[in-house]
Structure formats: C-alpha cells, structure tokens
Amino acid sequence: MAESQTNPKPKGISPDAKTLHQILSAAAPDGLAAALSATGIPPSPDLVQDVLRLSYSNPTAAIEFFRWAGLTNKHSARSWNLMVDLLGNNSMFEPMWDAIRSMRNEGVLSLPTFISVFGSYCSAGRVKEAIMSFEVMDSIEFVVLSAKNGNKKRYGVPPDVAAMNALLSAIYGEGGSTTLAVEFFEKTKVKISPDGDTFLILLEGCEREGNVAKAKTTFGEMVVRLGWSKENILAYSSLLMTLVRGRELEEAIKFLLVMKGKNCLPGLKFFSNALDVLLKQNDSTHAIALWDIMMDSGIMPNLMIYNTIIGILCDAGDADKAFRFLDEMVFYGVFADSFTYNMIFQCLVKHEKVHEAGEFFIEMIKNECPPTPSNCAAAIAMCFEGDDPEMAIEIWSYMIENSLSPVDESANALLIGLCNLRRFSEYRRFAEDMLDRRVKIHESTMEKLKNARYKDGRSARDTYDNLLKRWKAS
C-alpha cells in the first residue's frame, strides 16, 4: 500500500532530508544516532516528515531516526501519522499500536491515524483486524491488538460516518471480503447513520463483483434513508452500470426513467461507459434505447460516444442506422473522423454492399478521411466478387497515389481478382509496377497465375515465366 492519502507526498524533498536519508541507508544501527547528530542538521517537523516519506522501505532505520528526532523536538501530529502509516505499510503492527498509544498520550490521535490503520490491515489481507481497529477507536474496554492487554484508557476518537466509510473503502479497495464488508455495515449502521458516500462505496463494491441482487437492495435502502438527490448521482450511476454489465437492460432503463423524473439523471460519462459495455455485448437494441433517453434529456453527445453507437450499429450490420447517426452528427457540432468513416466502410464491405461501399469510398476521400489499408484490401476483394473491378482498381490507385501503406494485402487482392477475370495483360502491368515498388507478391498469388496461364499455350507460359523470374529476383 502506498503512503496514506492523509499524508500526501510533497512536490519536492529538501537537500537536508536527502542527506539524513542517505545516513539511514548507510549507517550501522548502533551508530545511527551519532551519525545523525554529527550532521548538525536540526530535525524540524517538516524535515522529519520528508525523511519519513523517503524511508518506507527501511522501517527499522526510520524508527531509530524518529526516536532521535524526538529528543530534540516534540513530534507533530502529521509526523506521528506518517510513522504509523510507515509501520502499518510494513506490517509492523505491534510497533504501530505502540505509536498509536503514544499519540493518545500526546493528545494528537485523530481520525486520519485510524484511516491509515484500516488501509494497512486491509492491504495485508487482515480485514478482521481492520474492523477490530474501528471497534476500539473510542472504546473504554478494548482489546489491544498486540501482545499486551489491560489498558483501559480511551483512544478518544469517536467512530463516525467518515470512519465507517474509510473502513468500507479500504476493504473494497484492497479486494477484501465483500461478506465481511456487508456484515460490518449491517452491524454498524444501527449506531452510525450511513450517508451518500457510504452507499456509493457499497454500490461500487457490488459493481466490481457484479452482484446485481445486492446492488438493487442496497440502492433501495439508500433511497428510503436519503431520498433522491443530485449529490448521489455517482451512486446511481454505479447501480446502473451493475445492471448494464449484468445484462438487465430493461431494469436499467426503468431506473433511468425514474431518475430522469427525479431530475437525478447521470451525465454523459455514464452513457459513454454503458454504451462501451453494450458494444462488447453486441446489443444495438438497448443501445438505441439508452441513446434516446440521453438525447431526450438534453445531454449533448461528443465524437467518442457517437463513434461508440455507430460501432454498435456497424457490428450489428445496421448500416442504414449508422448512416443516420453520421448525418445527424453535424447538427450537434460533432464531426466524424477517419475512425467513424472506417467503421461504416468496414460494415459495408463485410456485408458486401458493393455499390454503397464504392460511393462511400468516394465520400471518405472527399472528406479527407482515408480508409485503412486493411479495409482497402477487403474492399478490393469484395469489388471483384461483386462485379465492380473498376472500383477495385480505383481503390488501389488511390493507395499508390497517396502512399497509403502497407499495401501488400491490397496488391495481392487486386492481382487475384484480375487473374480470376482473366485480365492477364492488366495483371502483368500491375504486377510489374508492384515489383518495381518492392511490394510483396505472395507465392500463392503467383501460383494462381501459373495455373491459369499454363493452360493458355506457349506464349502465355513464356509471359508467366518472365514475370516469375522478376518475382524471384525481387
């Protein structure tokens, strides 16, 4: 676990801190205090914090440094919190609790201290100890989480909703047991009322594990306790994403319509994420339904989300609807890019829409959105199969004239198409030009020509043999 968020790293480390840290890394343990004192550098609170931030990988030396610095100045609350975090990060839990008891005696113990403890225990896979730490925050008869027992002083940090949320976040954030998290919540909510952040953490946990049933019940409890509020839209989005990923789209749409009526509809980010999931699920029907709700709510789409919905439609083979979205983009100030055009072009080619693909190719180059080399190769093959060899040649010529590369697959598709049509003079002309350009003609392509030409007499064989010699020499 990285250093606690309650103690963020500074933008820069002072030279004095680097000097002291070098001593911690090099000096023998029994001579460490003397080596530190010999520097003559006074251990100010800021300096102590800088050194501790550098010392997470050397906890034993950090402890000695902390003791040495404490002989000169009383440690600040931030320095103590760093020390607790450092010890917890290194699973040195007994020294960590010793430090916490010292903090209590110094009167500097606070919620950030325990937030660090929660994170350290959960990071170490010791969720039960993290929960026990929560339970002893303000307990008078607590169980000390070390080998020692019997201390009956209060820690004096009353657990509140912020502490409950911090522990839940630590459990889920470190991939801890969802069962333990839920048990902790059910037990704790009797004494501490959950807030919107609590339910957000719980719903995000349900989303991560794909627990649709638990997400629904948690959301229901949230609405009963807190009502509807724009402040909780992130939690609503988490529920909806759980439903979308769980393929409960009808349920998600029902919730969306309710949220719309409560003026609590999630924003563009939710719709973008949901459509990304539907793209993977190849669900164009529900994608259109979500899109319509988004547009009816006045949420303005951007290019990324337009590309997603067009991609969904193209994967479903619905080129007509894809064209509709392409045409309407401009009315919302969104302009298609090469990715947009290539998705539609690929769809047309895949579904052998020869005439439409040819026209769309012209539109693409007119709008300076060239097709990809792979789409060109597939389109050339399709044009020959669809009785439009001239468009195949036009696509190839465009590739050469505009230095669109790589061209190898397109070149071979062109030669095979010409061979199948027995347009051998053009085959030879294009093949010789390709060899001049060092384009790779596949052996299988040459073999196909050989099989065709060797049946046409001596002159045809000679023509092929000459081309073969050039091919072998290239």
Image (spheres, grey):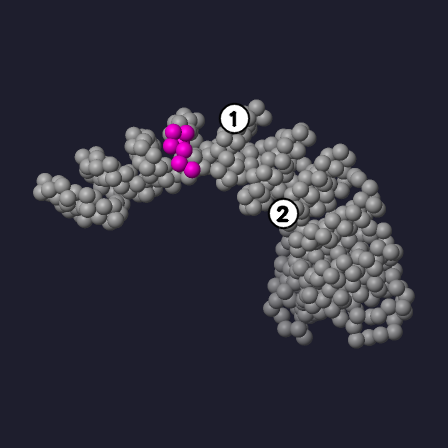
| Residue 356 within the magenta-colored segment of the rendering | yes
Any part of residue 44 in sight: no
- Secondary structure beneath dot 2 equals loop
In three-dimensional space, the C-alpha distance between marks 1 and 2, rounded to whole angstroms, equals 30 Å
Q: Quadrant of residue 97?
A: bottom right
Q: Determine which residue is flagged by label 1.
A: 327
Dot 1 lies on which element? Answer: helix
Residue drawn at point x = 15 percent, y = 44 percent: 455
- Would residue 217 be counted in the magenta stretch? no
Q: Earlier in the sequence, mark 1 or mark 2?
A: 2
Q: Nearer the viewer, residue 451 or 162?
A: 451
Q: Which residue is mark 2?
A: 247
Residue type (three-letter) at the residue carrying disc 1: Asp
Q: Is residue 171 above or below residue 276?
A: below
Q: Position of residue 358 (x, y in %)?
A: 38, 29
Amino acid type, residue under disc 2 in the picture: Arg
Q: Is residue 204 above or below residue 86?
A: above
Left or right side of 284 for 93: right
Provide residue 79's location: percent of width, then percent of height: 75, 58
Name of the residue lying farthest toward the left: 458
User: Which segment did they paint magenta?
Assistant: 351-357
- Neighbours of disc 1 within 10 Å: few (<14), some (14-19), many (20+): few
Question: Which quarter of the figure has residue 176?
Answer: bottom right
Q: Position of residue 23 (x, y in %)?
A: 63, 66
Q: Quadrant of the N terminus?
A: bottom right
Numbered badge on residue 256: none
At a point 78% along the width and 63% down the height, the residue shown is 131
